[in-house]
Amino acid sequence: MAVYTEVPFGEAAALAERLDLGVLTQLRGIQGGIENTNYFITCVRGDLAREYVLTIFERLDFSQLPFYLHLMRHLAQGGIPVPAPRADAQGEILHRLQGKPAAVVDKLSGRSELSPGLVHCQAVGACLARMHLVGRDFHMQQPNLRGLPWWNETTPVVLPYLDTPQHDLLVAELAYQNHVATLPAYRALQRGPIHADLFRDNVMFEGDTLTGFFDFYFAGCDTWLFDLAVCLNDWCVQHTNDGRDGQHDAPRAAAMLAAYQSVRPLTAAERELLPAMLRAGALRFWLSRLWDWHLPRDASLLQPHDPSHFERVLRARLAQPVGEVAAMLEPARTGVPA
């Protein structure tokens, strides 16, 4: 969440007034992330001060954004803890600032848990499964814009920046994922709206209690298994500065999978293709980080992520025995609680 667009205080205050949030008292740019401009805004009504998140969308246009915002509202109405978009008097939840699309959502309580334990992984797994089920009757459709077509378009752009081993790895894995997409088992996977970016910094906790998922602006309709694999690749791998970085953490992965399946058991096709989707999730984020690293955009607070972490995750997933992945699924049959 970098700052690409500077928003004048008066313009933000006028938006807060239109949304009936009260008087704007603070406007603070948020560091971290890479896609949109984000601010914390504080508004005061009477003696009560509340914080919200103001987002200016830098890549998504007015035609794409209703999917994300209405999905968040749909999930919130279905009992999933997500930030609900704020509407004006006409019921509009998509606004305009500095000529760009904008939205204001409630700020979740708590903080991100960057060193998760088993209880955090269980909470995420169970809530993710509930989110998938609640999303089944969401009526809007939009593809995952960072899915396989984007991988195929972006790979030739980043290949000139890679050394030979990286070049060969990227080309081979992309070919493999194109092959997977043709398989009957892949076509049989359960689909619906997914978050597609549910990393540790996009979930909030108060102690061990999950208080919400946020940053849905990579969401789209794709396989639920891919969404789960993205979570496993961030919540259930090592994040270190040594040779263990990117390596699989079996206890945390088993805990997340058991909790997910306590709400929505995986199908036979999903169990079969979990190893392939773990590789797909690693490829997606290695590729996007390569793109942001080698072809950065200007931003006053931008710090692109090092792509080497997800290169290591992908290599670890390639080296991981299929039987080890299958073993992670077994505890779910014993009714491990979420």
Image (cartoon, rainbow, N blue to C red):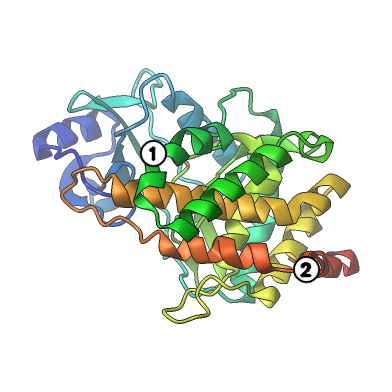
- Above or below, 213 relative to 245: above
User: In the image, 157: left or right of 153?
Assistant: left
What percent of the width, then of the height, locates residue 12? 18, 36
Residue 107 in view here: no
- The residues tagged by marks 1 and 2 sit, at their Cα atoms, a distance apart of 36 Å
Query: Seen in the image, is 80 located left or right of residue 7?
Result: right
Question: Where, by quadrant of the figure, is residue 94 drawn?
Answer: top left
Q: Position of residue 189 (x, y in %)?
A: 77, 39
Crowd tier of the residue under label 1, counting other residues whose Cα lies within 10 Å: few below 14, some 14–19, many 20 or above: few
Q: Which residue is mark 1?
A: 157
User: How many numbered badges does the structure rendering display?
Assistant: 2
Residue ID at (57%, 60%): 314
Would residue 111 appear left or right of 252 to someone viewing this image? Answer: left
- First reached walking from the N terminus: tag 1 or tag 2: 1
Q: Residue at x 45, y 57 (%)?
A: 164
Q: Is residue 78 above or below residue 257?
A: above
- Identified by mark 2, the residue type is Met
Q: In the figure, residue 143 lies in which quadrant?
A: top right
Residue 222 at x, y = what percent?
64, 36
Label 1: which secondary element? helix
Query: Can residue 11 be seen from the camera position used here?
Result: yes
- Callout 1 amino acid: Val
Frontmost of labels 1 and 2 is: 1
Q: Which residue is mark 2?
A: 328
Mark 2: which secondary structure?
A: helix
Nearer to me, 152 or 56: 152
